[in-house]
Image: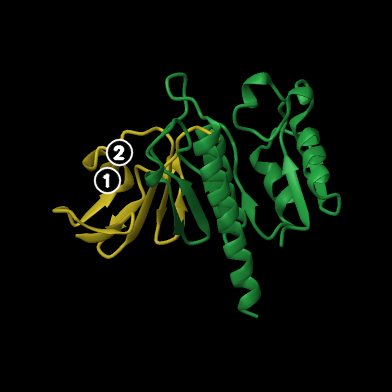
Amino acid sequence: MKIVLNNNPAVFTQPSLTVSQLLTERNYTFKMLVIKINGTLVKKSEYETAAIRDGDDVSVLHLISGG
Amino acid sequence: MGIGRLVIADFDVVEESNLNRQYYFFDQIGKKKSLALKENIRRINPLVEVEAHEIKIIASDVKPLFGVCDVLVEAFDWADQKAMLIETMLEQMPRKPLVVGLGVAGWGAGNAIHCRRIDNLYICGDEISEAGVELPPIAPKVGMVANLQADTVIGILLREFVSL
């Protein structure tokens, strides 16, 4: 499937992925994340079930401390 | 040109270690930050209305305190607080602009500081430099990111006015 991930095109061999699978696939091991699919927030409790499909616009924001 | 009304919230007290980057002075050590900042703003311009809250913000505080504001600016220390605010905004006030600071620690590599937008979320910082014991946040970079946040706020407000 082809998606937009953090404003860049990304291609995966799988036809769809759960958010958890995407994080594993891309090695996003960070603890604090805010994830949106097509403009909608995906909560941490939904990572195992929320599906990413062809054409989706996904943003994975890594939050770090400091201010 | 400036902002006529500000709503600020902080539970914390001014400490000596804050003085390297936060807008407080030596004689304010021990004071509540929200009150000290209100004093400092009003010394710059007494015509600015400052509504100061001494409170540790949790998700349920966000809309009651900041729902009246046109733009929110995030300046928390910790990643989990930033996550809480971003998620709360996305769920409860997704059309209201939120400008966050992300990656403000250390020195050098100022070129990595940027501002990017995801819908109504604006992210300012280098998104890499996590503050910690080995990489403290200090004034120059913190100031650059804070000013970029302020500049972003002005851009948001002026576009809104222009679009009328």
- Look at label 1 and name its amino acid: Leu
- Look at label 2 and name its amino acid: Tyr
Chain B palette colour: green
Q: Is residue A7 above or below residue B53?
A: below
Q: Is residue A53 above or below residue B81?
A: below
Which one is in front, B89 or B29? B29
Task: Please tell me which residue is depicted at 26% across the width and 60% down the height of the picture.
Answer: A3
Q: Residue furthest bottom?
A: B164
- Whether labels 1 and 2 belong to a single chain: the reply is yes
Q: Position of residue B140 (x, y in %)?
A: 52, 36
Q: Position of residue B61 (x, y in %)?
A: 71, 43
Task: Give the SS element for disc 1.
Answer: helix
Task: Please tell me which residue is depicted at 57% across the width and 45% down the height of the picture.
Answer: B146
Sequence order check, earlier mark of 1 and 2: 1
Task: Give the SS element for disc 2.
Answer: loop
Q: Residues within 10 Å of mark 1 (few under 14, many from 20)?
A: some
Q: Which residue is mark 1?
A: A22
Q: Are marks 1 and 2 in contact (CB under 8 Å)?
A: yes
Q: Position of residue B105 (x, y in %)?
A: 46, 32
- Which quadrant, please, contains the C terminus of chain B? bottom right
Q: Is residue B159 above or below residue A64?
A: below
Q: Which mark is residue A28?
A: 2
Q: The chain coloured yellow carries which letter?
A: A
Q: Chain of mark 2?
A: A
Task: Please tell me which residue is depicted at 49% across the width and 32% down the height of the picture.
Answer: A65
Which one is in front, A59 or B139? B139
